[in-house]
Image: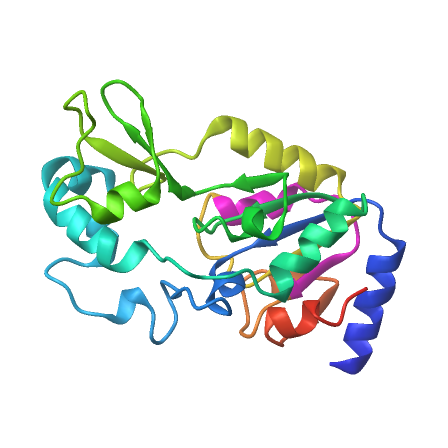
């Protein structure tokens, strides 16, 4: 760990265009459950599997059932940014970081102060009426009963990418452009098993690709440096 950490520190000091690509492991250290960990949502029992509930088709067919699960398991209040979020925001302020590309939907990068964040899977903090487009915050969804409705009578939908939905094209283009320009790509807290998001790292053209993840990933062979420590622990020690 020490040797790899020292190498990463030197790469960070030399970098001028860092891009960070992160997944659920970045948020678990802030107390937000991981979908695929041993104790994550995917190992709990419901009337329907989470993959089914969190699908576009299920949202349309069984909206009330979707929202029962969504309020209980997806809306997390009180979570705070951890050292990984804070370090990335620091690098952006210093002009070293081009962008954060995240699979998370909790808004913690922005809470830490990051401005250029590509949220591949959307955000629970944004909700819009499907009829008139009016915006509603997460608190409104949490405090509503049954299917949340707009004042116009339309159904409100979270701005999260459900199974069966496409990723936002502008978000993808921005993320791809940032990754392609990076001189240091740090990937953290992700199994790199969710596509098409995981495939974006193939746009990196440099030779300083760092993986910070506690378990092995299908892309370990692509990495130039691997650290198997908790991401917050690693980032707390970076310059």
**Horizontal and vertical percent position of residue 154:** 17, 24
* Residue appearing at x 20%, y 55% in the figure: 69
Q: Residue furthest bottom?
A: 2
Q: Which quadrant of the structure image shows residue 98?
A: top right
Compared across the picture, whether 119 is left or right of 12 comes to left
Q: Quick check: can you spot residue 190? A: no
**Horizontal and vertical percent position of residue 117:** 59, 41
* Residue appearing at x 63%, y 48% in the figure: 113
Q: Which of 56 and 123 is in front in this view?
A: 123
The segment highlighted magenta reads: 197-211
Q: How many numbered callouts?
A: 0
Compared across the picture, whether 226 is left or right of 4 comes to left
Looking at the picture, does residue 125 appear above or below residue 28?
A: above
Q: Which quadrant of the structure image shows residue 202?
A: top right
**Horizontal and vertical percent position of residue 115:** 63, 40
* Residue appearing at x 81%, y 64% in the figure: 239
Picture quarter with the N terminus: bottom right
Compared across the picture, whether 139 is left or right of 101 comes to left
The colouring scheme, among rainbow, by chain, secondary structure or one colour, is rainbow
**Horizontal and vertical percent position of residue 94:** 81, 47
Q: Quick check: can you spot residue 4? A: yes
Q: Does the magenta stretch include residue 236?
A: no
Q: Which quadrant of the structure image shows residue 163?
A: top left
Q: Does the magenta stretch include residue 206?
A: yes
Looking at the picture, does residue 193 appear above or below residue 145?
A: below
* Residue appearing at x 41%, y 43% in the figure: 123
């Amino acid at each position: 760990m020490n040797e790899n950490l020292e190498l990463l520190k030197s790469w960070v000091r030399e970098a001028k265009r860092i891009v960070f690509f992160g997944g659920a492991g970045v948020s678990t250290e802030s107390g937000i459950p991981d979908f695929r960990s041993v104790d994550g949502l995917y190992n709990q029992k419901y009337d329907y599997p989470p993959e089914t509930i969190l699908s576009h088709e299920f949202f349309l067919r069984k909206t009330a059932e979707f929202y029962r699960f969504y309020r209980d398991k997806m809306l997390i209040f009180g979570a705070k940014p951890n050292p990984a979020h804070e370090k990335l925001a620091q690098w952006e302020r210093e002009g070293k970081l081009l962008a954060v590309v995240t699979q998370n939907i909790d808004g913690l990068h922005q809470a830490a102060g990051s401005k250029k964040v590509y949220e591949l899977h959307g955000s629970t903090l944004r909700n819009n009426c499907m009829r008139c487009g009016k915006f509603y915050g997460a608190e409104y969804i949490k405090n509503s009963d049954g299917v949340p409705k707009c004042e116009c009578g339309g159904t409100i939908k979270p701005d999260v990418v459900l199974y069966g939905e496409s990723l936002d094209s502008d978000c993808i283009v921005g993320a791809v452009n940032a990754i392609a320009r990076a001189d240091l790509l740090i990937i953290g807290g992700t199994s790199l098993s969710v596509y098409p998001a995981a495939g974006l790292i193939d746009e990196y053209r440099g030779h300083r690709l760092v993986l910070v993840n506690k378990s092995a990933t299908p892309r370990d062979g692509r990495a130039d440096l691997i650290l198997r420590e908790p991401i917050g622990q690693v980032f707390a020690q970076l310059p």
